[in-house]
Amino acid sequence: MSDSAPQGQDLEKYGYTQQLARSLGFRDLVVYGLVFMVPIAPFGIFGGVFQGSGGMVALAYAIGMLAMMFTAHSYSQMSRAFPMAGSVYSYAGRGIGAPVGFLSGWMILLDYILVPALLYLIAAVAMNSLVASVPVWIWLIGFVVLNTVVNWFGIEMTARINKIMLVAELVVLVIFLAFGVIALAQGKGNGSGFHAFYDSGTFSWSLIFGAVSIAVLSFLGFDGISTLAEENRESARAIGRAMVAALLLAGALFIVQTWIAAMLVPEVPTLIKEGDPDGTAFYDAARVAGGAWLGTLSALATAIAWGFANSLVAQAATSRLLFAMARDRQLPAFLSRVDPRRRVPVNATFLVAAVSLGLGLYMNSRDDGITLLSSLVNFGAMTAFLVLHVSVVVHYVVRRGSRDWWRHLIAPLIGFAILTFVVVNAKVTAQRLGFLWLAIGTVLMVGLLVAGRRTEIPDEPTAAEEAGQA
């Protein structure tokens, strides 16, 4: 299959018709990925990563970026082979087999379904800390309704909003970095220097990878670019290139901002010992850099970025995954309905909004709601990424006989090894609940098979088949 072939024709080879609007270019895809990851994402979880890494927060983000780069490479390979919506579900289902695809989609759903709820909750809590007279649940409902309306108007509206929000986030980040550098030059730092990258007194691989399992939350979202494959107007290569570009840009920003913030933390021993239960560690560092106004600006930017910009694209990506699975009869058929005018998966979009609202309100009633959601999101994503790496090897090396050892064997194996270490060092609670979710998915898959809902996922046409169709 040619990467330059018309995208609609590519989709028809797999038995599907083009329903979604192909209106996104490479720049739109990169912006989408950056907004999904949030350039200021470390603001909200800085304290947890700092404590988990023993202060080596920049190192945790550097290793997290490396791990995600190998994952982006595997996404790139599979998106070129199967240029369609569905992310890991489509790639594993076609690269390995339908049952594996279902379970992969089920695990990535743990990430995609929970991410919007997590974002809404964090943003609502942040806004409540700024305007205490408005309860968390009202902020949460407001964010859900606003994002659902924007997504209902179509992917073009979402893309335009994305660009505006990205510029706003970058402006806030530049302000923090500027005042942070000035503060350090004036001697306001804690003298930690390069300890954010390496501290011989506390370093251990298990410690760092345990922190990486938290830090990767900031990177989750680059994979959402793959869910827009059927709305990409350029060649199939654009999906993979956009993922790599978004990861490199976001990773560089994450490392720089956490390094500067680490040198401005007012009480390093206290933060490492007691953690950051209120999620204010970054804002405390911002106050050291520029005063109370910068701390407030950082908190407000986090709330808007997580509650509007990030959750907007998260809802869009999740609805596309549900659409793809429903189209293949792995979920109820009503989720595959596309609005004929706006050309968006309307029922899937509304379902994501309802689930996000329900989960957000429930988790708000729990003391460990944000921590529990974060752990589950990361575990679901990491396990699905593991299957993605296997899909590359099976599809290209085993089935297609590829001898491109680096792209189709070595790189996926390295990515698999790094992510395995991250999953092993994740919190025990996340592991238990994650495997419980996997068990539920397995039972559901068996039930679908028994009920006759066996999926026929068309594979990539062979060269002989394509020649016969010509």
Image (cartoon, grey):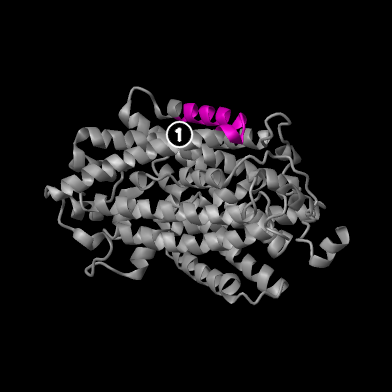
Q: Is residue 141 magenta?
A: yes
| Image coordinates for residue 69, horizontal then vertical, percent | 48, 61
Residue 11 location (% of width, % of height): 74, 50
Q: Main secondary structure of the magenta part?
A: helix
- The residue most toward the top is 133
Q: Quadrant of residue 20?
A: top right
User: Which residue is rendered at x = 35% and y = 60% of the image?
Assistant: 60
Question: Is residue 78 inside the magenta stretch?
Answer: no
Is 350 placed left or right of 274 in the picture?
right
Q: Residue at x 65, y 50 (%)?
A: 86
Up the image or down, 294 lies above or below 146; here it is: below
- Seen in the picture, residue 460 relative to 138 is either above or below; the reply is below
Q: Against 342, is 99 above or below?
A: below
Q: Position of residue 97 (x, y in %)?
A: 72, 63
> Which region shows up in magenta?
140-157
Q: Quadrant of the C terminus?
A: bottom right
> Where 110 sits versus 75, above or below?
above
Instruction: Name the one closer to the observer, 142 or 233.
Output: 233
**Residue at the extreme right:** 468
Which residue is more in the foreground, 259 or 31? 31
Q: What is the x, y in percent for residue 324? A: 69, 47
Q: Secondary structure at mark 1?
A: helix
- Would you say residue 358 is visible in this rendering? no
Q: Residue at x 55, y 69 (%)?
A: 412
Residue wearing tag 1? 164
Q: Decide which of 440, 351 is in the foreground and name it.
A: 351
